[in-house]
């Protein structure tokens, strides 16, 4: 019999089961209160709008082309609509700067593929989006720590990368309500990231998956818009912006987008042509229908719902969490990041939480490229109502308080 | 300004514009008769069935989950239906052996990613499917020539691969009505490929994109079914089968599948989770609706239509082609492969054909990993009616006859 490990590519050793995904399989028991998911609430999907969109497509003259192959760049009317949306947030661009992907996760995979040769270095925050680490891992990079408001010198990054046999290729960050922390990088931090990228002559990958989900506070301009303002136009920029419809409209269609310099877009289009030809034609048309019909209304609806849930979770944390536990106070997104008393292990806590308190979350370690972060946990407030949030945080606070007492 | 070429990964140098895709852009002039495409005829799509499927999904209790994230393995009822279909062609397997991809093109990309480290060798036929070369190129392999009924020794493959710094990882072939030749590998040829793979201890990738489109002659068992019969079960096999709904139902939904040993499937699922999470949930459900509702009826419909077009093209070729020109006589699929008189260049012929005779096809060279094959062209009969086929081949025959006379 063939020993498959013998003929798999070297990159395959870095493809391992995701703790989160494996975990989600355990959470199908209905009596568990789960703050683990981090997925949108299906009750908020614009299902009626999608119903109308698919019905219109299937009864209109477009039906043949909706079911047919289409161009790798993506559906032109959707890219045109996106140009208008990007202009509203300070990103003036043309359709040649917009590329449709099968969810922004695919965008991250393609950007890893475009930039990373084995032993190159990617800069990521500690912690960062787990899915970004998984996507990049396939291209066998090293990681170094991006600190948007820190003081690491460009030389230190260059030297680290060279000592590992490659060079720094990009800095990846989610600047708004990041997964997993919920935190936002302020304008000064964004400008420092741009300055660092300029010095290292690398790209910046701006993951904007949660950017539309601001509940209060002042919007910070996207990194790409700051760079366009500074450099006079998108063709002079090094920032690559990854957008997603998964949190605003629906993830099941797998439609996201990338905005960048046209030199990068052209290369990504060639890559997609070779990798999967194009994203689903009919789904791109359906997204265009629903987005043009009422994107702002839909975003207002989910903001109101998630904002109330965030408030409920922050109130419950204030009420039930013991001394020595800290957490972020996000202005948007889906996540709150808890720092447990030093020495507490989030994974061990989860096992106890499921067994004794029937409450679930994601342990923090998976979000760290260096495997640290064991005393953090991620809570998502997107899929539970306010009463359930209160009850779940009460249970979690009780468990953590018991742990703190036992350790004392 | 950033010099992007400086920071792109080495693999990016192998991502170049596809001649076929660039060509297709020129073919939008309505007075050209095109045999270039190789795409299914949209008039044959089961549009009514898809209309019902999307309407049922969007009005049923499943709507929330159809718009939501879903598992990387693929939609279970679709995988169950595929188990039944695979059993009919001699491939007994369970759902753990079936993995849904975003079109079989994505399957090829993932298999390249799973097996190929830079400088490894992939065995492909000369010519082969251009899209397979493009998908594999991203992983920087070398190619060696697979000759299903030839007599190359395993040692010659091993030595060639070693001399290039890697090892042979798989043999890729489309055994039924291949793109671009339309030819089918007979049972003896399939068994020889399996024996070679056994000797080299490599995988076999069986691209079955056209397998359902047989118009006459006796079906040859799939390579995977021959191996299962020999080895007693799918868990003992080395063949990876790639299936597609693009030619039978519709390509615009981007749904295909892979059948293999569960060790391979598990690794592919991890890869997909990192690369794009999962294929479109709603489209997988729609495909399952349409397939369970009447797959065989739909296949019978397209077989009848394409078979008549193939007959028309073969008759026209007999009638209009000059001496010294040869062609394949496919028992199925979408393509006929023309061998022009020695010294004729297919690309030059295309330029003349578009300019003077307003007829188009694909020059053969792009399908050869070694850049040979200039005196071949590929004709597709899938998208033209019989009268148009007759007229187009008449024009093409006239042009080639003129070329032959000019060369004499």
Image (cartoon, coloured by chain):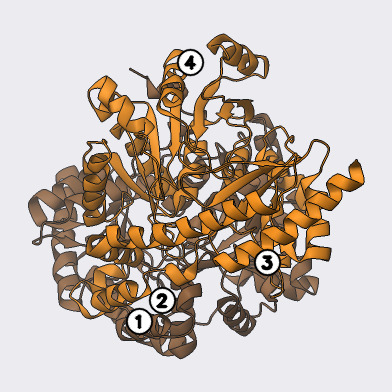
Chain colours: A orange, B brown
**Which badge, 4 or 3, is on the more N-terminal residue?**
3
Residue holding disc 3: A33
Residue holding disc 2: B248
Q: CA distance from mark 4 to mark 3?
A: 45 Å
Asked if labels 4 and 3 share a chain, the reply is yes
Image quadrant where residue B165 sits: top right
Residue displayed at 14% across by 47% down: B352
Callout 1: chain? B
Callout 2: chain? B
Closest to the camera, between mark 1 and mark 3, is 3
Mark 1 in CB contact with mark 2 (< 8 angstroms)? yes
B333 with respect to B91 (left or right): left
Number of residues whose C-alpha sits closer than 10 Å to that of mark 1, classed few (under 14), some (14–19) or many (20 or more): many
Vertical relation: A109 (above or below) B59:
above
Residue B166, how many percent across, how many down?
67, 35
Callout 3: chain? A
Number of residues whose C-alpha sits closer than 10 Å to that of mark 4, classed few (under 14), some (14–19) or many (20 or more): some
Nearest to the observer: residue B64 or residue B99:
B64
Residue A1 appearing in the image: no
């Amino acid at each position: 019999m063939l020993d498959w490990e013998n003929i798999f590519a070297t990159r395959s050793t870095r493809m391992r089961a995701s703790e989160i995904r494996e975990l989600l399989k355990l959470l199908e028991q209905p009596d568990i209160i789960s703050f683990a998911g981090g997925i949108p609430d299906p009750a908020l999907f614009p299902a009626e709008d999608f119903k109308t969109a698919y019905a219109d497509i299937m009864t209109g003259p477009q039906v043949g082309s909706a079911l047919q192959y289409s161009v790798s760049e993506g559906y032109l009317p959707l890219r045109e609509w996106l140009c208008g949306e990007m202009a509203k947030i300070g990103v003036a661009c043309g359709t040649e700067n917009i590329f449709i992907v099968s969810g922004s996760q695919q965008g991250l995979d393609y950007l890893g593929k475009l930039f990373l040769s084995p032993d190159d270095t990617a800069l990521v925050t500690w912690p960062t989006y787990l899915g970004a680490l998984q996507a990049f891992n396939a291209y066998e990079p090293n990681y170094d720590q991006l600190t948007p408001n820190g003081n690491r010198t460009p030389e230190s990054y260059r030297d680290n990368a060279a000592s590992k046999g490659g060079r720094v290729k990009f800095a990846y960050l989610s600047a708004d309500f990041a997964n997993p922390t919920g935190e936002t990088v302020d304008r000064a931090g964004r400008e420092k990231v741009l300055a660092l990228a300029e010095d290292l002559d690398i790209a910046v990958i701006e993951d904007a998956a949660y950017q539309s989900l601001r509940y209060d506070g002042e919007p910070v301009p996207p990194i790409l818009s700051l760079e366009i303002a500074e450099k006079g136009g998108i063709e002079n920029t090094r920032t690559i912006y990854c957008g997603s419809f998964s949190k605003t409209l629906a993830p099941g269609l797998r439609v996201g987008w990338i905005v960048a310099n046209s030199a990068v877009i052209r290369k990504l289009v060639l890559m997609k042509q070779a990798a999967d030809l194009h994203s689903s034609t009919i789904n791109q048309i359906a997204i265009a229908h629903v987005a043009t019909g009422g994107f702002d209304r839909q975003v207002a609806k989910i903001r109101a719902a998630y904002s109330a849930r965030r408030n409920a979770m922050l109130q419950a944390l204030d009420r039930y969490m013991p001394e020595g536990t800290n957490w972020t106070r996000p202005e948007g997104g889906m996540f709150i990041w808890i720092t447990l008393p030093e020495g507490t292990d989030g994974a061990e806590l989860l096992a106890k939480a499921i067994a004794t308190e029937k409450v679930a979350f994601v342990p923090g370690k998976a979000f760290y490229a260096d495997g640290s972060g064991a005393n953090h946990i991620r809570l998502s407030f997107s899929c539970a109502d306010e009463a359930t949030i209160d009850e779940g945080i009460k249970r979690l606070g009780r468990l953590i308080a018991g742990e703190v007492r036992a350790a004392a």
